[in-house]
Amino acid sequence: MKIKKRGIAGTLESSDVMVVINPHDSQEIKLIVQSKVEKQFGSSIRKTVKDTLEKCGVVSAVVDVRDQGALDCVIKARVEAAAYRASDEKNVKFGDLS
Amino acid sequence: MRLRRSMMFIPGANAGMLSNSYIYKPDSVMFDLEDSVSLTEKDSARFLVFNTLKENLYGDIETVVRINGVETPFWEDDLDMAVRAGVQIVRLPKTETVEEVKELEQRIEKIEKDCGRTIGDTKIMAAIESACGVVNSVAIAKATPRMVAIALAGFDYLVDMQTSRSSGSEPELFYARAAVLHAARAAKIDAFDVAYGNVNDEEGFLREVEIAKNLGYNGKSLIHPRQIELLHKAYAPAQKDVDHARKVVAAAEDAEQKGLGVISLDGKMIDPPVVHEAQRVLLLAEHS
């Protein structure tokens, strides 16, 4: 999945996470995470974001994550929504995301 | 036998509510992709509901997804997501004809085949929200073996009937309530009464619960967690009914052990429907 433009999903409400995905000029994921539970869950959040991007087939992007204590399933959902919006891909393959 | 007293609505785009509503322990939870989700968030709501279902946050609570209506450009994507995520029931809003149910059923079967889910595993609930839906409710309720429940939705129905909600005995809903419930019973499926919108009016809510319960509804659609406990308490059976139900079930078990074809209690013959009702009373008591 190619990131073509800025894609945003989520909110800054409690238990949610805002994910902003932008195109990147190199073939890597640049990940910035801000979380109110950074100390306890920072590495887990990073892993979830990276794994989800990999499932979506995103290999190049700048990803800004602002977490408000979101569950793993919410982080995955917000990353997927932002990635699909950033790629302009309308045909979501939920079977591939399982 | 499954209790369906409370079906709580959760907006599909609300991450916080999706994350923690299981703590209120409704019998069923309905993730909404329709009215509570803005047009610009239909896509993100699908991802949220999909991942919430895959995470199995809700355990034993029955999961329902309300998809957008078949007249919208969203319902096929909603359905694809919900069936692949393993939802137990798909709720079809504004159901008016058998043809709509048949179209939904065919589409579900196609997705089930495609994703390897057992054919027939995904159940259907039809929401009746118009005069046309009420008139066709018997045929809708019997349209498919997948249909497990039918729900009356009051707001749109009353708009269609050119009236509005009153207080007290609510004569404006009387016919629809009776018709939808009869449709459900004729089809041997469950029935949900309308949601009560004023979450701060406990007295009005309980008055409406009493109407629904006395008519024979299995439960109600709910829009706020605080209504769950009130509803469950209202549906709790009286102790004397529980005591009698225990005796009936014990007599039925005793007759089965002895290989007797006829069940009797205190010299009176008991029919199978009485045993079934006693089992339902005990289930209600257990979960009250």
Image (tube, grey):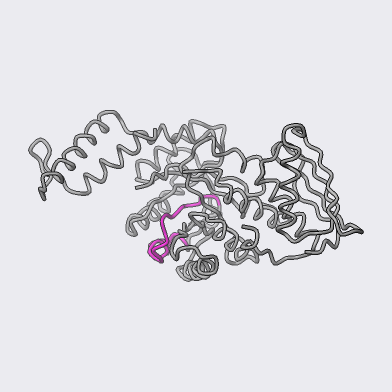
Q: Is residue B223 left or right of residue B180?
A: right
Question: Measured along the vertical axis of the image, is residue B99 above or below residue B179?
Answer: below
- Which quarter of the figure has residue B162? bottom right
Of B188 and B160, which appears nearest the observer?
B188
Of B153 and B192, which appears nearest the observer?
B192
Q: Is residue A37 left or right of residue B20?
A: right
- Taking the spot 65% from the left edge, 50% from the top edge, the residue there is B48
Residue furthest to the top: B239
Question: Measured along the vertical axis of the image, is residue B103 above or below residue B67?
Answer: below
Of B175 and B67, which appears nearest the observer?
B67
Q: Position of residue B161 (x, y in %)?
A: 51, 56
- Taking the spot 44% from the left edge, 48% from the top edge, the residue there is B192
- Which quarter of the figure has residue B42? bottom right
Q: Is residue B15 left or right of residue B166?
A: right
Q: Quick one: quadrant of the C terminus of chain B?
A: top left
Question: Measured along the vertical axis of the image, is residue B271 above or below residue B167?
Answer: below
Residue furthest to the left: B267
- Taking the spot 54% from the left edge, 69% from the top edge, the residue there is B114
Q: Position of residue B86 (x, y in %)?
A: 53, 56
Q: Position of residue B137 (x, y in %)?
A: 41, 61
Instruction: Say whether residue B140 is magenta.
Output: yes
Q: Position of residue A66 (x, y in %)?
A: 80, 41
Label tally: 0
Of A21 and B165, which appears nearest the observer?
A21
- Which quarter of the figure has residue A4? bottom right
Instruction: Say whether residue B44 is magenta.
Output: no
Q: Is residue B8 left or right of residue B72?
A: left
Identify the magenta region.
Answer: B133-155
